[in-house]
Amino acid sequence: MNFTWADRMERLGTESAFEVLAHARRLEAEGRDIIHLEIGEPDYGTPQNIIDAATRALNDGATHYTPASGIPVVREATARYVAGRTGVPTSAENVVIVPGSKNILAFLLLAVINAGDEVIVPDPGYPIYRSLVSFLGATPVSAPIRQSNDFRLDVEELSSLVTPRTKLLIVNSPANPTGGILTRDDCESIAKLAVEHDLVVLSDEIYGRLTYDGEHVSLYSIDGMAERTVLMDGLSKAWAMCGWRLGFGVMPVELAKRMDTLMINSSSCAAAFTQMAALEAFQSPESDAAVDAMVADFRGRRDLLVDGLNRIPGITCRRPAGAFYVFPDITATGLGERELQTGLLEEVGVAVLAGTAFGPHGAGHIRLSYANSSANLQRALERIALHVGAGAVPPA
């Protein structure tokens, strides 16, 4: 049969990390030794107490449908967790539990965005923002994230992007791919802008627990923002639970009701046993200790990678304040970001991502994840130095 594809499929993007991972796996199948710095996934295992909680839940019968927005006790625990971290009174009715936090993004867009609306997205930023906005027939508008501003939004420049068609602003802090974080002053200025222009805000805080320098400030916590903000988060990063597929959103009650309807029409619900695992993650001191230990280890890996990259001629790298990525400037090597991505993988076995995989303003950069062992990071640095030294063109 010859399918006729809907026009919207031409507007749907992808996530380059998975494409590079697939290429790297093919090379490994041929016997190549590949160091994976492309995928945004902790190399840690899920804490054992969380696994044990899920196992108990399965043995106790957590194998059935749950309410679409989540098991009530889990929604209540999530609300307490968010209130404790943000200081904002939050109830279970504000919480929607989903099978992966991308659903919160998709449901928000489906609920509030019409074709022709404009959505401001960070650039460079998580590529699915732009992909889903375009898929729905809306217009993604790039908000440049520049190294010269320490990979933070320039709020004055952001203000200039708002038009009468602007409906939604997407903010990510700590950020993928740069590791940049917004300051409290940044958040207060963004909040003022959102109120002034009556914008809905999606605050993607999936890396909120992975902060090394400064503080993580949630936009949801700024006065006047809870009524217009969707806080998007999940368990993938902090608790090393990417494969469990469990995310959550916190939002005004009327929006949560619409998301409940969208869940009924799509996934029905998140798996019951994974929700009970979340209960353990949110409430157990043992889980908090595991997160703290992982963050401390990531801090050391970050420093190893940043210091090593800055010793390689032609590469300059800022020390990111959060997440587990670095986004070095490679323009002085004379190599383009796509050229370097391909060469590092195929010639020396280091999988990284071109900065333009995250938007046009990622030109001149590559993204490396330090969610890998210190030993592998050191090996990667040696291979990168070898490749850049062999192939670089001296800057003009």
Image (spheres, helix red, strand yellow):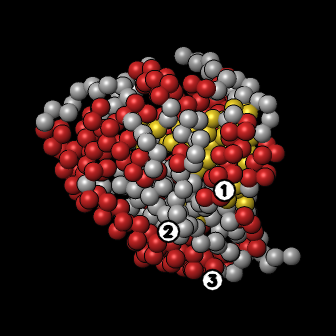
Closer to the camera, 123 or 231? 231
- Above-or-below relation of 296 to 352: below
Q: CA distance from mark 3 to mark 1?
A: 32 Å
In the rendering, at what x and y percent does residue 157 appear? 79, 51
- Check residue 311 in the rendering and tell me which mark sits there, or answer none: 3
Residue 60: image quadrant is: top left
The residue that mark 2 highlights is 212
Callout 2 environment at 10 Å: few (<14), some (14 to 19), or many (20+)? some
Give the farthest residue toward the right: 396
Residue 49: image quadrant is: bottom left
Q: CA distance from mark 2 to mark 1?
A: 18 Å
Q: Is residue 125 left or right of residue 29?
A: right
Closer to the camera, 141 or 67? 67
For badge 1, the amino acid type reads Asp
Of badges 2 and 3, the one in the foreground is 2
For badge 3, the amino acid type reads Arg
Give the farthest residue toward the bottom: 311
- Check residue 186 in the rendering and tell me which mark sits there, or answer none: 1
For badge 2, the amino acid type reads Tyr
Callout 3 environment at 10 Å: few (<14), some (14 to 19), or many (20+)? few
Quadrant holding the N terminus: top right
